Amino acid sequence: MKRYDLHTHSTISDGVLPPEEVVRRARDAGLAGIALTDHDSTGGLADARAEGARIGVEVLTGCEVSAQLDGVSVHVLGYLIDVEHPRFQEEMRWIQDDRIVRAETMVEKLQQLGVLITMEMVRKHAGGDSVGRPHVAMAMIEAGVIENTVDAFTEEWILEGGRAYVPKRVMTPEDTIALIRQAGGVAVLAHPIWVENDIGRSEERIEAWAEAGLGGVEVDHPEHDPTWRARYQALAERLGLLCTGSSDFHGNQHGGMIGENTTPEETVAALRARATAPEVTR
């Protein structure tokens, strides 16, 4: 049976490996394909696909789109999107621009707390399109303030509500789902345990998002224990949502090893069947 890892990151956002190397790691793990799902960017897709064509690994169009509910991040995976869709491109540019402003403000707050980092350091670690908190954390490691990126995600530093945290200016989950569908794609909720841990009542919220057009739930994720996997699978089946599995691979402490959790080819075929023609915008 062919297996796919539908949630991976590269240096285009907060992964540590370039898109081509992510694809090679997928080959080494025996995968038939991956979705490259960098945060709010499809900038690595062309390089990943070129390498995939060379070594026999399929690369599906993907993007992990930032959303927010009650001031807390909610991530929605968009699959099989028309990446040239005008409104999708416009929203991604808007989010990217805000990422820069957000990072600059976090750097200023950290400087006021005595952390000697600069925006130049953050940009150096970002490298790609998406500047985010992991890159701020990498700059903090460089400055000798913390030992690893996980240490930055505390109330002392840049966790939600932390001393140097700055909220995003992003869409609601419902608007994000609508955007993905407008661009012809299928929306899948990433790591729903984050919703449960950060906001609560994840099952009720998934029911509401299913009404809004959500197409699937990332059931098998490194942070889901067997109990949560069973609960999310039962919920998805009741709501008629697809169940996906993935590693959330970053190549560092975040996420798992590529191929750790996978999605069978039958589910990938079902994703393709749910994708639609993009809506025409004026």
Image (cartoon, rainbow, N blue to C red):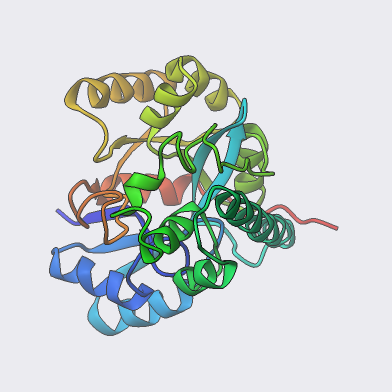
Seen at 49% across and 74% down, the residue is 124
Q: Is residue 31 above or below residue 55?
A: above
Left-right relation of 60 to 171:
left
Q: Residue 201 placed where, x, y %? A: 46, 14
- The answer, for residue 142, to whether it is visible in the render is yes
The single residue placed furthest to the bottom in the displayed view is: 54
- The answer, for residue 57, to whether it is visible in the render is no
Q: Is residue 185 above or below residue 243?
A: below
Q: Nearer the viewer, residue 134 or 56?
A: 134
Left-right relation of 19 to 29:
right
Q: Nearer the viewer, residue 59 or 171?
A: 171
**Quarter containing the C terminus:** bottom right
The single residue placed furthest to the front in the displayed view is: 114
Q: How many marks?
A: 0
Q: Residue 238 placed where, x, y %? A: 38, 18
Left-right relation of 68 to 202:
right
Left-right relation of 26 to 204:
left
Seen at 62% across and 30% down, the residue is 71
Q: Residue 197 placed where, x, y %? A: 40, 24
Q: Quadrant of residue 59?
A: bottom left
Q: Residue 146 placed where, x, y %? A: 34, 53
